[in-house]
């Protein structure tokens, strides 16, 4: 993620300092033609500090850097888990913000090979972003938005939520549900190929096409599902989905999910 972020920041007019601690990471930064700065120097003068590091490292990294930040500066993390769980070091005069990319929509109108190839976003395909900032100062929000639009470019819209709402979206809505379903689709595909003996090309073709129809009909109501399809869908729900599955949206379940992701016994409140 640090490479993705810096690949976009280097294209802007912002004055950017790049900090990396691992030997392999430092080699990548230098190989990309960027100059490394030591953390103390970079943080001391920064209006916004972007922590493009894994969730499990955010507690220790923020503990080291936040005390060195200038008053009024912004600490931006790229995932809400650590912020929601209260793992970040805080200061009354340092603003906490979180931003996460939406990734290019499955319904995005793509027109170039580069846009089709950019399924993650941040290269060629436009995407939205979600952001939260714990400040009522419009100037601070403008700084966060400018940074978000730079690191996730090209960005269509930046949607503003609370840190808790962002955590409810990521992981609950998009990882616990959407990514899980994506993996389930792949498992079902392999079952059709390996167990049922369907030719792989045929199985992939019908699944890929019907996945598009399912998303278009289910999420946008493009066309009604047939009566027979609705009966098969009911059988699928009865066979696969637990009746109480919506509990994952409860606060206690969100805490449980994030505790597992962050390797914690529990989220302390």
Image: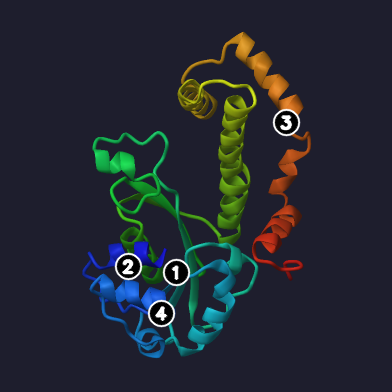
Q: Tell me which label, 4 or 3, sits earlier in the chain.
A: 4
Quarter in which the C terminus is drawn: bottom right
Q: List x then y, in percent, for residue 35.
A: 26, 80
Q: Secondary structure at mark 1?
A: loop
Q: Nearer the viewer, residue 195 or 61?
A: 195
Callouts 2 and 1 close, C-beta under 8 Å = yes
Q: Which label sits in the foreground, 4 or 3?
A: 4
Q: Tell me which label, 2 or 3, sits earlier in the chain.
A: 2
Q: Tell me which label, 2 or 1, sits earlier in the chain.
A: 2
Quarter in which the N terminus is drawn: bottom left
Q: Tell me which label, 4 or 2, sits earlier in the chain.
A: 2
Callouts 4 and 3 close, C-beta under 8 Å = no
Relative vertical location of residue 26 with respect to residue 150 in this rendering, above or below: below
Q: Secondary structure at mark 4?
A: helix
Determine if residue 90 is in view.
no
Q: List x then y, in percent, for residue 102.
A: 45, 49
Q: Which label sits in the foreground, 1 or 4?
A: 4
The residue beneath circle 2 is 6
Q: Nearer the viewer, residue 130 or 231?
A: 231
Which mark, residue 52?
A: 1
The residue beneath circle 4 is 23
Relative vertical location of residue 17 with respect to residue 257 in this rendering, above or below: below
Q: Residue at x 62, y 74 (%)?
A: 87
Q: Tell me which label, 1 or 3, sits earlier in the chain.
A: 1
Q: Tell me which label, 1 or 4, sits earlier in the chain.
A: 4
In this rendering, position of residue 31 left or right of residue 141: left
């Amino acid at each position: 993620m640090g490479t993705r972020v810096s690949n976009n920041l280097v294209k802007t007019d912002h004055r950017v300092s790049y900090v990396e601690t691992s030997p392999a990471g430092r080699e990548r930064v230098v190989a990309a033609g960027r100059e490394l700065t030591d953390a103390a120097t970079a943080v001391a003068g920064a209006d916004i500090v972007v922590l493009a590091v894994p969730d499990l490292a955010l507690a220790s990294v923020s503990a080291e850097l936040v005390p060195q930040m200038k008053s009024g500066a912004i600490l931006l993390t790229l995932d809400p888990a650590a912020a929601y769980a209260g793992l970040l070091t805080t200061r009354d005069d340092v603003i906490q913000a979180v931003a996460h990319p939406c990734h290019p929509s499955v319904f995005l109108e793509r027109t170039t090979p580069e846009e089709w190839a950019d399924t993650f976003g941040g290269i060629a395909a436009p995407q939205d972003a979600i952001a939260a900032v714990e400040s009522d100062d419009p100037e601070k929000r403008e700084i966060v938005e400018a940074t978000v639009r730079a690191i996730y470019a090209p960005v269509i819209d930046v949607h503003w939520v609370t840190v808790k709402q962002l955590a409810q979206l990521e992981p609950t809505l998009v990882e616990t549900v959407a990514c899980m379903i994506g993996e389930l689709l792949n498992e079902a595909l392999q079952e059709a190929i390996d167990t049922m003996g369907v030719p792989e090309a045929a199985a992939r073709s019908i699944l890929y096409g019907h996945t598009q129809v399912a998303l278009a009909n289910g999420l946008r109501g493009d066309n009604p599902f047939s009566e027979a399809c609705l009966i098969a869908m009911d059988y699928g729900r009865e066979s696969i989905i637990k009746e109480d599955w919506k509990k994952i949206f409860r606060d206690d379940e969100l805490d449980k999910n994030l505790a597992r992701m962050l390797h914690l016994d529990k989220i302390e409140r």
